[in-house]
Image (spheres, grey):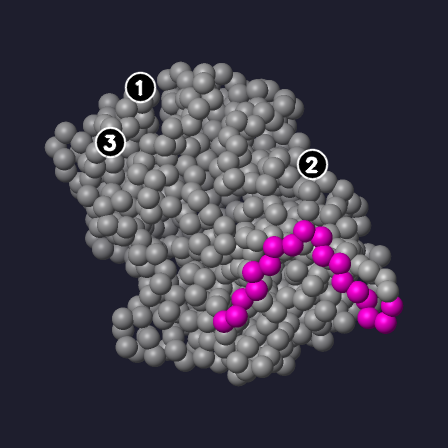
Amino acid sequence: MKLLFILLSTVLCCVTGNAQQIKTIPIPGNLVIDGIPTLPYSIVEEVKPYTDARAAGIVTWHPVEKQMLITTRFGNAAQLHRVKMPGGDRKQITFFNEPVGNASFEPAKGNYFLFTKDVGGNEFAQIYRYDVATATNTLLTDGGKTQNGNITWNKKGTKIIYTSTRRNGTDRDIYLMDPLQPSSDKRIIELQGGGWSINDWSEDEKYVLLTNGVSINESSVWIYDVAGNKLTKFLPEENERAIFSGIKFSKNKKSVFIFTNNGSEFAQPVQADISTKKISYITKGINWGIDNYQITKDGKTAAFTTNEAGISKLYIQDLLTKKYNPVTAIPVGVINNIKWHNDNKSLAITFITAASSADVYEWNVAAKKLTRWTESELGGMNLSGIESPALIKWKSFDGLEISGFLYKASKKFTGKRPVIINIHGGPEGQSLPQFIGSGNYYLNELGVCIIYPNVRGSTGYGKTFTDLDNGIKREESVKDIGALLDWIEQQPGLDASRIMITGGSYGGYMTLACAVHYNDKIRCAVDIVGISNFNTFLKNTESYRRDLRRVEYGDERDTAMASFFERIAPLNNTQKITKPLFIIQGKNDPRVPYTEAEQMVDRIKKNGKTVWYLMANDEGHGFRKKNNQDFQLYSTVAFVKEYLLK
């Protein structure tokens, strides 16, 4: 495939028929483009109010002082910042070209913290130590093509255990290290599979709580005896297909808190006796999925969030009586993360709404008071004419009810409005009614409505719903979008003759599949890091995640499944795609390798159809750097104007 590598400063081109010259958008050298026309600089000016919004998220509290680390972006990539008080300065303390989004303080004094960072989106995260006194960073792990993380401290703050794939790149083992002496690093548990994670390390350092994840609906809890060097399966006792995921050892060391959906559609926290394995349900009466369950340092209080049709609710629970109460002071929105301070009363919350990007709040359980710690800027974005997203529902081909969220165009636009259908990845994900950032440009300036569907296979609606797209049922989720297209035809305010499909990762596969099956019902499609053939995808995805994906999609080593994959592959059905296609990819993507994009581009070009291609050499599974995100937006806006709106 002939690709264009262009490094420009300011380019001038002549307008046909006159001598007027117009400025065009320069293309950085890290980007590879093919088929994308020269873009007028006016797009930059048009969308600028929608590209400067920031967001903030809680990373961790300081173990002693009442201050926190958050992640936010002031430069090109999100970095760690320290905030010492509500409304205080966001002081940046990491300065990398790559994003940094997590950290863990040494738990005794907080003199240093550990964080992970990869390079170019390759997801080979390495562990670093940041020393507060000297503001210096030290690499602690091998720096190679391995994944390292899941850091868990001992109570004294002198040692960590963590997971790493360094032994063979596939299996996720457990290692022990004194972060002040990296040479002390050693493997203590050799495991098989890439789905292992560390949940807790007992205060006496005698036991480690682990989870082995097989799929979104199957996992098991294990306990490792450090002194005896013995790993024992705890739950389930039989090999049953259900979630059993560790949370924490109880304070009295006699039980374990875990998540399980055994006997229920939704996972919920339970307390399991270590000696008898008897399970006690501790959140009875809640018939929604529980996303998070965090226990205070003293073990007396828990906080958890529920997902109620996409809306988050926060609850505080007394672990002695097991009674819980909702926190009603939090407005309608989505809670992405919660973290207790060591004072056992201050709970940090990352909170987001459709009208505001993520920010950090504190709920004080003693004072029963909600305090805002950060206030992220929206740039020049004016959302005064934008309505709150509406929950919509439709019946699919088999009568199953599917739902999603409709973001309506600004009221200043009249008549039937064009529609973008944006499909989430995963497929074990869920679209929520939250802030869509630069996506507000389409609503506010172009008069386009956006629908975020939750097709079968999505989480948040119970384990049965999540399983409905597995294996040979794959294209049934595609039919859910077909039913949505029929629903749009019935809506008086939506224009069924102007529809664009888009999505990322698995949503990218869905985009390509819809371009095949519903070519006559759409105007165009934008595929972002999508799968074009499950056979080639499973062959080339990183080995540590291959078996996990086989459970969801099917095992390509089975001849019948491989044949099914070939039959449904968008790559093998490109002759059915006649509408313009835009494909966006990161060169370092370990999940969906860039070859999935390039083989699709080549095939569309051979068919003589319209295809735009954008690849960033310094990105992975989606663009995380602002300069690349901005260019992706510029080119997508040009694509939408040309092929959806004209």
Q: Position of residue 18 (x, y in %)?
A: 87, 68
The amino acid sitting under disc 1 is Lys
* SS at badge 2: loop
Work out whether mark 2 precedes mark 3 in sequence or the reverse, and give the earlier one.
3
Q: Nearer the viewer, mark 1 or mark 3?
A: 3
For residue 234, side relative to residue 486 (left or right)? left
Mark 2 → mark 1, Cα distance in angstroms: 39 Å
Q: Which residue is mark 1?
A: 156
Q: Nearer the viewer, residue 348 or 81?
A: 81
The numbered disc on residue 64 is none
Instruction: Identify the residue at horizontal 50%, vertical 22% (top origin).
Output: 345
**Magenta stretch, residue numbers:** 1-18
Instruction: Identify the residue at horizontal 72%, vertical 57% (top origin).
Output: 11
Q: Looking at the figure, which quarter contains the C terminus?
A: bottom right
* SS at badge 1: loop
Magenta segment, principal secondary structure?
Answer: loop
Q: Which residue is mark 3?
A: 185
> Relative to 91, does residue 51 appear above or below in the rendering?
below
Asked which quadrant contains residue 39, the reply is bottom right
Asked which quadrant contains residue 363, the reply is top right
Work out whether mark 1 precedes mark 3 in sequence or the reverse, and give the earlier one.
1
Mark 2 → mark 3, Cα distance in angstroms: 42 Å
Q: Which residue is mark 2?
A: 377
